[in-house]
Image (spheres, helix red, strand yellow):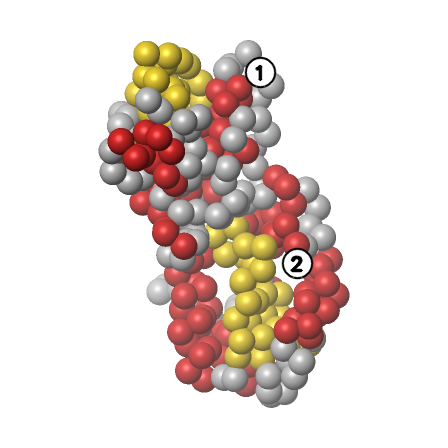
């Protein structure tokens, strides 16, 4: 799994270490989880630290007890409105602790947007965010934007294959890693990681920060060879297959197109 420098997830107002990938992917934080508003807090808490830490906040999860199950889009949605209990305090001033009976979605929203008031159940319920499937549905509509973006970086590009990626989704992350490894061995390919925020995707601001678009840019013009390679890496044949019909559909995985 790839996160930004120092292993914190990009796109969140609070500092979220990579160890919380399952919690983010499942939207399920559990007892004992403690997160901070700045990466400064993930260091030794000595005198120098306390001098720098003024104004930093922490959130400590008191319940539920259960650790997150393997993440999935359905689990994320199911957990969004489930109850959780938390404490929020300013580092170095733990006598001013505020306790909330809140929801998993409100915790996620705090970490993402940085607004502590969202934990209060009397405030508006945060909308359930969009995940990778939302980006998948938007691919055809952003084809021309992708072509312009690609030509600005790879002038001799001929074809591209774009697919949603989520570092907290084991299936999507595994698929992308398989493509990166396999295609780099068999084709003259460049790999681009494109932020959703840079694309004309409807309601892009509601797409979770862990989702991006992975774009594989091919510099040769052998379309059939590229398609066969993609099929080889993406197609998983059913074990109980009863027909010889080729059921592979490349658009079930992403968007393949001339540049």
> Who's the residue at 32% across and 12% down the image?
95
Place of residue 247 in the rendered image (x, y in percent of width and height, measured from the top left): 53, 68
Q: Residue at x 35, y 30 (%)?
A: 51
Q: Nearer the viewer, mark 1 or mark 2?
A: 1
Q: Position of residue 80 (x, y in %)?
A: 48, 29
Q: Using residue 208 as the reference point, say whether residue 20 is left or right of it.
A: left
Quadrant position of residue 38: top left
| The C terminus sits in image quarter | bottom right
Q: How many badges with numbers are in the image?
A: 2
Q: Secondary structure at mark 2?
A: loop
The residue at which mark 2 appears reads as: 139
* CA separation in Å, label 1 and label 2: 34 Å
**Residue of label 1:** 123
Nearer-N-terminus badge (1/2): 1
Note whether 63 is above or below 40 in the view shown: above
Instruction: Specify the label residue 81 is tagged with.
Output: none
Q: Looking at the figure, which quarter contains the N terminus?
A: bottom left
Q: Nearer the viewer, residue 229 or 13?
A: 13
Q: Is residue 25 above or below residue 1?
A: above
Q: Can I make out residue 79 in this image?
A: no
Residue 79 rendering spot, x and y as whole percentages: 43, 30
Q: Secondary structure at mark 1?
A: loop
Q: Is residue 175 visible?
A: yes
At a point 43% along the width and 54% down the height, the residue shown is 4
Q: Quadrant of residue 34?
A: top left
Judge whether 150 appears above or below 92 on screen: below
């Amino acid at each position: 799994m790839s996160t930004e420098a120092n292993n914190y997830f990009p796109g969140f107002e609070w500092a979220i270490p990579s160890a919380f990938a399952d919690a983010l992917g499942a939207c399920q934080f559990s007892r004992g989880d403690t997160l901070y508003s700045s990466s400064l807090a993930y260091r030794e808490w000595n005198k120098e630290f306390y001098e720098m830490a003024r104004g930093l906040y922490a959130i400590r999860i008191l319940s539920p007890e259960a650790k997150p199950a393997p993440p999935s889009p359905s689990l994320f949605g199911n957990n969004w409105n489930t109850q959780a209990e938390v404490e929020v305090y300013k580092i170095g001033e733990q006598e001013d602790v505020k306790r909330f009976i809140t929801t998993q979605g409100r915790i996620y929203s705090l970490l993402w947007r940085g607004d502590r008031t969202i934990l209060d159940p009397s405030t508006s319920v945060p909308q359930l965010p969009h995940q990778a499937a939302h980006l998948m549905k938007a691919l055809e509509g952003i084809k021309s934007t992708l072509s312009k973006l690609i030509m600005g970086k790879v002038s001799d590009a001929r074809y591209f294959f774009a697919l949603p990626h989520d570092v907290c989704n084991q299936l999507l992350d595994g698929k992308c890693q398989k493509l990166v490894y396999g295609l780099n061995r068999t084709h003259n390919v460049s790999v681009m990681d494109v932020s959703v925020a840079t694309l004309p995707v409807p309601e892009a601001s509601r797409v979770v920060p862990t989702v991006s678009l992975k774009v594989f840019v091919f510099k040769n013009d052998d379309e059939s060879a590229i398609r066969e390679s993609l099929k080889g890496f993406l197609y998983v044949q059913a074990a109980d297959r009863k027909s010889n019909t080729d059921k592979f559909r490349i658009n079930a995985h992403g968007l393949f197109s001339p540049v």
